[in-house]
Image (cartoon, rainbow, N blue to C red):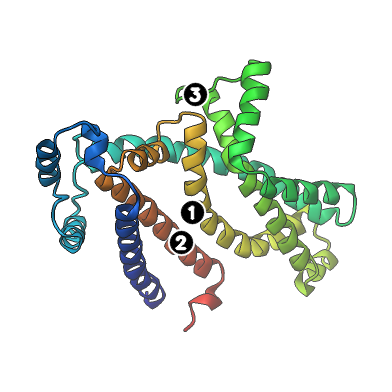
Amino acid sequence: MTFFLNRLAWTLPILLGVLTIVFFLLHLIPGDPVDIMLGEQALAADRQQMRAALGLDRPLAVQYLAFLGRTVRGDLGSSIHHRRPVAQLIAERIPATFELMMGGMAVAFAVALPLGLLAALHHGRWLDQLASLFAVLGVATPNFWLGPLLILAFAIRLDWLPVNERGTLAHLVLPSITLGTAMAALLTRMTRTALLEVLGEDYIRTARAKGLGAWAVVIVHALSNALIPVVTVIGLQIGVLLSGAIITERIFDWPGLGTLLLDGIYGRDYPLVQGCILVIAVTYVAVNLLTDLVYGWIDPRIRRP
């Protein structure tokens, strides 16, 4: 219980820091949301009236305190552009983003675990070299380049898969591959390294000496212990998936939280951007908290003070 409370206590200052940085950085971005909404040819009186209605005429410190007060109450405000509650807009987009994240993680797991396992079992051979090459290329390939390349190859040239927006399972294939490739490459490397370390331990040799089959030794004894660093990396990669989903959603016109966030940035929609960043930050912190708990469950030594 103490382990959980200590981890939970760190989340509050982190979220406060994220909210503070986002609030002030947004107001430093050039451009006025009132001018974007009304146009540069609008009358000064109309701009002033709109600015007062949106609360943008108040001092920045007053706006910040009001923003924190609303956030503590669970009120994310109303979108300047959409004229709708931010929480409602985010609730409509979150399912699409999590669907894309689950697709990217499924691709990563389906590729990384078998490939990392085979690379460790064939250490130094051609399969190990192939896995290492994939790990390097996967990490080095940006999704803003991979996404259009997949669209060109499989949607335009071969016409095998649809592109743009959200619909059937086929619409999820290309965005999931784009989002999950970098994570698959990193997890392949981590799985291979962790397994190579574990396979050299004394208890693995003891299990083999007792006559256990090769796959029983690897799956039951080696893989379960090798997953400890892999679980940590998976938790950290959730934030990477969230940030990568922003670009991937724009490439594939996926109606998720990333697309909504970019639209808010382009339109200087302060409440919308702040709400999106808050949801992303809370998700990232919650996943890392869960990762710490799972990490402590797998290895009880971590829970010791």
- Do we see residue 217 in this rendering? yes
Q: Give residue 55's position: percent from left, percent from top.
A: 13, 49
Q: Quadrant of residue 32?
A: top left
- Asked whether 70 or 190 is in front, the reply is 70
Q: Which residue is under mark 3?
A: 164
The residue at the point 25 percent across, 41 percent down is 33
Q: Which residue corresponds to mark 1?
A: 239
Q: Residues within 10 Å of mark 3 (few under 14, many from 20)?
A: some
Under mark 3, the amino acid is: Asn
Q: Residues within 10 Å of mark 1 (few under 14, many from 20)?
A: some
Residue 288: give its label.
Answer: 2
Q: Is residue 171 above or below residue 1?
A: above
Of labels 2 and 1, earlier in sequence is 1
Q: Nearer the viewer, residue 219 or 48?
A: 48
Amino acid type at image mark 2: Asn
Q: Position of residue 291 (x, y in %)?
A: 49, 61
User: Vertically, is 249 above or below 119?
Assistant: above
The quadrant of the rendering that contains the N terminus is: bottom left
Label placed on residue 121? none
